[in-house]
Amino acid sequence: MLRATLITLTILGATTAQAQDTTTAEALALEYCAAAIRFDEGAAENLMTPALRDLIAQARAANDAFLKKYPGDKPPLGDGLPLTGYQDATESCVPESVTETSAVLIYAPASSPSDIWRDQIEFEAQADGTLAVSDILYAPDLTQRFSAVMTGIATATY
């Protein structure tokens, strides 16, 4: 029994606490795709710049203020962080084109795999030589930014 428990914990640890490879743009794009498919906000946040993580923290604080003021109403982050430009779960995510500063990601929703969309993630070099996601531009036209959505939530008065 103890052996089975240790094996289970080892497997869980390997899937939830793996080091994320952010040394190349290609690796970062693949890591972000993996987080988006699992809708793993923590893994996605770990791939983001400190400035973007701070903005998320501010948006979450505003979301909590909304919940206190309007209990029972759906808060701005009621569906979680908008990691992609599509509201439903994605079945696949593939980097279509990757440069040193960005990657276009192709998503297919689980509800309709033929209805693909493309978001773009932007990268910023970090002091330790790794890359981090500095913003997400949403489909269909790549003009709406994740940072603008988070700023709008963070600065709203509830």
Image (cartoon, rainbow, N blue to C red):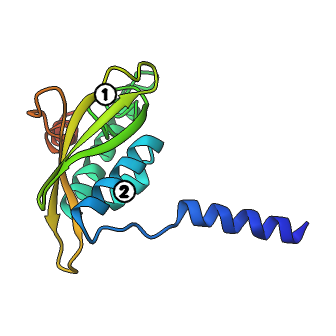
Res. 123 image quadrant: bottom left
Q: Where residue 113 sits: x, y (%)?
A: 40, 23
Mark 2 vs mark 1, CA separation in Å: 18 Å
For image coordinates 13% across by 57% down, the residue present is 99
Q: Which residue is mark 1?
A: 86
Q: Which residue is mark 2?
A: 31
Amino acid type, label 1: Tyr
Which is nearer the eye, 79 or 102? Answer: 102
Residue at coordinates 21% horizontally, 42% vertically from top-left? 150
Q: Earlier in the sequence, mark 2 or mark 1?
A: 2
Which quadrant, please, contains the N terminus? bottom right
Tell me: 97 left or right of 76. Answer: left
In the image, 88 versus 154, the foreground residue is 88
Name the outermost residue toward the left: 143
Q: Residue at coordinates 12% horizontally, 62% vertically from top-left? A: 100
Vertical arrangement, residue 133 with respect to residue 129, above or below = above
Return the residue found at the far right.
Answer: 1
Q: Report crowding for label 1: few under 14, some 14 to 19, many 20 or more residues within 10 A (C-alpha).
A: some
Q: Position of residue 13 (x, y in %)?
A: 61, 66
How packed is label 2: few (under 14 Cα within 10 Å), some, or many (20 or more)?
some
Q: Is label 1 in a helix, a strand or a loop?
A: loop
Q: Residue at x 74, y 62 (%)?
A: 8
Image quadrant in which the C terminus is located = top left
Q: Kindly identify the amino acid type of the residue bearing the numbered disc 2.
A: Glu
